[in-house]
Image (cartoon, rainbow, N blue to C red):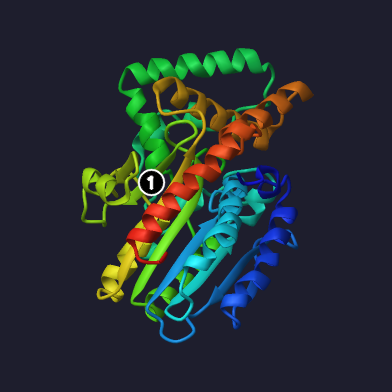
């Protein structure tokens, strides 16, 4: 049994320290491995940390693990990366495999327990192959329902506001408004800077950083295997693999290939600006010979039914309102922040144990199938 506590710290700085200490372990196998830190944003000391090495003899493939694209989700992601180094490094052959590990693609969000960047941008809606193709009026449903998605004054009475939101959303969910809410989540929106699911109108520094890494790995290795760790989506206490439509296999084929219960495929008609989609697009356009596997791995919290979805939208909307407008009562502020943690970084031992257990299943099945693990 793994010691759960040691993997789940409470602050961004602790998590980053632990990550930086992995360098020594990795250098035992890849003596030239290096740690690079890249400052991101206005606040000093927010960094993206990357440990990287090429293979020792021939660059046949690379294992690429990333965390914290959605800030607060980075705690679990960083835990999984550390567990991977502790438990699986011995099974990777450094003579033919390189390694690239990233801690906190969105360090500000991780530090402040938000999903978005300091510019309120959902990073995973900010990746466009042609940056000038960022759509400005992509989501007409969002504009129609904007009273829901935009902050409008301080949180005054959490019980009342929560009930009102539930009613508004479930009324919407029963009718066509449901599709509007779903669409806003998947497609993002590019008009309202202070609204939820904002994808930004220019490229975030973190986006440019990851794009560089994607290009570097695709140009260095003929096989690139990427696991991007996230939280919240899918059945409670289970892992769900979310794959780009660019993967030619259907969901059932992938379930058989990886022996995983939960697989979801998304399409650019439903999701815009996603980083794994960008990875595949870049590969197809510029490195067509390269083999790429890239997917999101989500650890479910609230669950996958409608009730869970309502709770999720309510949490996201209230947290955004709290961030921009504040709350009149301290207990309401605390309630919202706690609910946000319940959604993206639950304190319960049961959930944290499931993260480790499910991550092991995913790592073993994907990295064995993809020939990273011996
Ligand atoms: Zn996420």
Query: Picture quarter containing residue 113?
Result: top right
In the image, farthest residue toward the bottom: 57
Is 272 left or right of 123, judged from the image as shown?
Answer: left
Residue nearest the observer in this picture, 324 or 64: 64
Residue marked by disc 1: 241
Circle 1 — which element? strand
Residue at 40% in and 22% down:
306
Is 60 left or right of 16, judged from the image as shown?
Answer: left
Residue at 68% in and 16% down:
157
Is 244 left or right of 30, judged from the image as shown?
Answer: left
Q: x and y percent of residue 9 in the render?
A: 71, 47
| Image quarter (top left, top right, bottom left or bottom right) of the N terminus | top right
Q: x and y percent of residue 214 in the render?
A: 43, 69
The answer to whether residue 37 is seen in the rendering is no
The answer to whether residue 122 is seen in the rendering is yes
Q: Is mark 1 within 8 Å of ligand 1?
A: no
Residue at 38% in and 63% down:
132
Q: How many marks?
A: 1
Query: Picture quarter containing residue 278?
Result: bottom left
How many residues crowd around disc 1 within 10 Å: few (fewer than 14), some, or many (20 or more)? many
Q: x and y percent of residue 334 in the render?
A: 73, 27
Q: x and y percent of residue 347 in the render?
A: 66, 34
Residue at 65% in and 43% down:
4
In the image, farthest residue toward the right: 330
Residue nearest the observer in this picture, 142 or 365: 365
Is 325 left or right of 71, judged from the image as shown?
Answer: right
| Image quarter (top left, top right, bottom left or bottom right) of the C terminus | bottom left
Residue nearest the observer in this picture, 343 or 365: 365
């Amino acid at each position: 049994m793994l010691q759960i506590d040691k993997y789940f710290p409470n602050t961004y700085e602790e998590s980053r320290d632990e990550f930086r200490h992995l360098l020594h372990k990795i250098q035992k196998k890849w003596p030239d491995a290096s740690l690079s830190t890249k400052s991101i944003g206005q606040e000093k000391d927010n960094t993206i940390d990357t440990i990287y090495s090429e293979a020792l003899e021939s660059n046949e493939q690379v294992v690429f693990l990333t965390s914290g694209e959605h800030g607060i989700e980075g705690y679990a992601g960083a835990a999984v990366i550390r567990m991977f180094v502790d438990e699986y490094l011995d099974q990777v052959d450094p003579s033919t495999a390189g390694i690239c590990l990233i801690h906190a693609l969105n360090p500000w969000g991780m530090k402040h327990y938000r999903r978005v960047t300091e510019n309120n941008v959902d990073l995973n809606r900010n990746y466009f192959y042609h940056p000038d193709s960022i759509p400005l009026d992509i989501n007409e449903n969002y504009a129609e329902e904007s009273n829901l998605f935009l902050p409008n004054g301080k949180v005054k009475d959490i019980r009342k506001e929560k009930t009102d939101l539930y009613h508004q959303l479930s009324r919407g969910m029963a009718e066509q408004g449901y599709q509007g809410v779903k669409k806003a989540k998947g497609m993002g929106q590019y008009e309202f800077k202070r609204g939820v699911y904002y994808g930004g109108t220019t490229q975030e520094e973190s986006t440019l950083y990851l794009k560089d890494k994607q290009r570097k790995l695709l140009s260095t290795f003929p096989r690139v295997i990427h696991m991007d760790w996230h939280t919240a989506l899918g059945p409670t206490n289970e892992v769900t693999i979310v794959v780009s439509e660019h993967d030619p296999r259907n969901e059932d084929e992938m379930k058989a290939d990886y022996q995983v219960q939960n697989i979801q495929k998304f399409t650019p008609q439903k999701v815009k600006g996603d980083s794994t989609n960008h990875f595949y697009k870049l590969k197809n356009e510029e490195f067509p010979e390269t083999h790429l596997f890239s997917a999101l791995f989500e650890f479910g919290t609230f669950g996958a039914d409608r009730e869970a979805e309502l709770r999720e939208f309510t949490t996201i909307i209230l947290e955004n309102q709290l961030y921009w407008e504040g709350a009149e009562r301290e207990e309401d502020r605390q309630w919202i922040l706690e609910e946000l943690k319940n959604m993206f970084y639950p304190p319960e031992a049961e959930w944290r144990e499931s993260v480790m257990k499910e991550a092991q299943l995913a790592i073993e099945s994907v990295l064995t199938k993809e020939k990273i693990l011996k």
